[in-house]
Image (cartoon, rainbow, N blue to C red):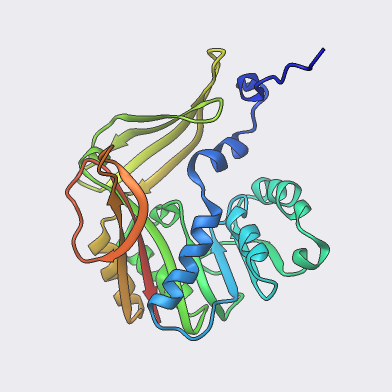
Amino acid sequence: MAKVKRNRTKWRTARTSDPLELYELAVQSPDAEVRMVDRVWKHFGRPGLPHSLREDFAGTCAISAEWIRRRATNSALCIDLDPAVLSWARRHHLSKLTPAQRRRITLRRADVCSANGGPVDAIAALNFSYFIHKSRRALVDYFRHIYGQLGPNGVLLLDAYGGADSFLELTERRSLDGFRYLWETLRYNPISGEVHMAIHFEFPDGTALRRAFTYDWRLWSIPEVTEALAEAGFRRSVTFWEGTDRRTGSGNGHFRPSTRGEACEGWVAYIAAAR
């Protein structure tokens, strides 16, 4: 009698699920991110390919692990303040690398605003993590510090989000592989620009991980970010805007350099800068 193949995704519950694994599945695309680093390098006319990457607010270091696998000449420095998350990265990502690959990746518990380790070819601060800096002075100081960590041809890759819905206290829901991802704006203050966000996960059995991750940020606009980059010393910056899927009306995952974006309910973009 043939074995019945069970759908393992139906086994997800709040009790048996790992929030960090769910986070990676819901919001990260390491392969796309490392390809974007290469693309930004070429866009600014840098010679050859970038090889050294610093990942700020690295979390589980998924991007850096993918970077190490991309080329045998690549190296990565992952910086994060949370020792528990860095430990998780060692168990779940570094353990899957070969010994030679592990020698090319360094995990460091440190503050990204003061950590040294340069010069590197590229720095990535993604998942809107730099929004933790709530004042213009703090944002410029961070950008000025990482400017000094880049080599002479160095590039920086950031992302940003916005749109009409980002100013509303509402919840975005997406059904994924065996769970539902919820991105909630808990509070938004239009006077200060401060925003409190939360990620929740819901499961087919009715259980949930409420506020699995929470964020206390300032919602920076693209022109505010690019002006802060210029003040910090970056000579050029460019916004990569996402195209629109004509069938669904949502983003199509293809980002192109642009000076004009659509005034839509929600958008995500990359911001790249060069020394």
In-front residue for pair 272/197: 272
Residue furthest front as drawn? 1
- Quadrant where the image shows the C terminus: bottom left
Residue at left 59%, top 51%?
59
Asked if residue 116 shows in the view, the reply is no
| Quadrant (top left/top right/bottom left/bottom right) for the N terminus | top right
- The mark tally for this picture is 0
The correct choice, above or below, for 79 with respect to 20 in the image is below
Give the vertical position of 19 relative to 145 (above or below). Answer: above
Q: For the point 76% across and 57% down, which residue is it?
A: 97
Which residue is located at x 31 percent, y 34 percent?
Answer: 187
x, y percent for residue 43: 38, 76
The residue lying toward the viewer, choosing from 159 and 216, is 159
- Quarter of the image where one finds residue 170: top left
Residue 18 in view of the camera:
yes
Residue 209: % across, % down? 54, 25
Residue 145, percent from left and from top? 46, 74
Q: Position of residue 132 (x, y in %)?
A: 42, 53
Direction from residue 1 to residue 189 in the image, left or right? left
